Image (tube, helix red, strand yellow):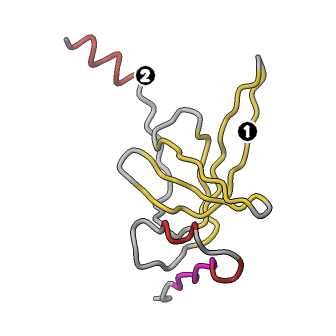
Amino acid sequence: MDLMKFVQEQNAVLREFPKFGSGDTITVHYKIKEGNKERIQQYRGVVIQCKKATFTVRKMSGEIGVERIFPIHSPFIEKIEINKYGKVRRARIFYLRKLTGKKARIVERKFAAN
């Protein structure tokens, strides 16, 4: 039993990502395998929900909204950058799906300087 725990601890790669929440604009650097090659793809969008194990990022590709669900502890996530902190009043902002143009903007959160 102790040997199994030891192997699991060695294989578990726990990385620290910055804290982010719904409404924040983030860039996820994601590894993609194509055949025998690997490359890193950047996916930038607004976080519309955060759960314990996953988070959903929505971006606009032209006039079409594209959502992608990322597992938090995925080995394919290289890093996460926070581009902008958003000020929203809900944990899940699915109402963003219906909005287009300037209505879909999220107010940036200002931090008080101490």
Look at the magenta stretch and give its main secondary structure: loop
Residue 109 in the image: state x and y as whole percent.
53, 82
**Left or right placement of residue 75 versus residue 105 in this view:** left
Return the residue nearer the eye: 97 or 1: 97
Residue 89 in the image: state x and y as whole percent.
41, 79
Residue drawn at 60 percent across, 66 percent down: 25
Q: Secondary structure at mark 2?
A: helix
**Left or right placement of residue 2 versus residue 21 in this view:** left
Residue drawn at 38 percent across, 53 percent down: 51
Residue drawn at 48 percent across, 88 percent down: 112
Residue found at the very far left of the displayed protein: 1
**Please, what is the three-letter code of the amino acid marked with disc 1?**
Ile
Q: Which residues are magenta?
A: 104-110
Q: Which residue is mark 2?
A: 11
Label 2 neighbourhood size at 10 Å, few (<14), some (14-19), many (20+)?
A: few
Q: Nearer the viewer, mark 1 or mark 2?
A: 1
**Please, what is the three-letter code of the amino acid marked with disc 2?**
Asn
Return the residue nearer the eye: 70 or 101: 101
Residue drawn at 77 percent across, 18 percent down: 35
For residue 12, what is the image quadrant? top left
Q: Secondary structure at mark 1?
A: strand
Return the residue nearer the eye: 46 or 76: 46
**Disc 1 to disc 2, how far (Cα)?**
22 Å
N-term mark: 1 or 2: 2
Rendered position, 25 above or below 14: below
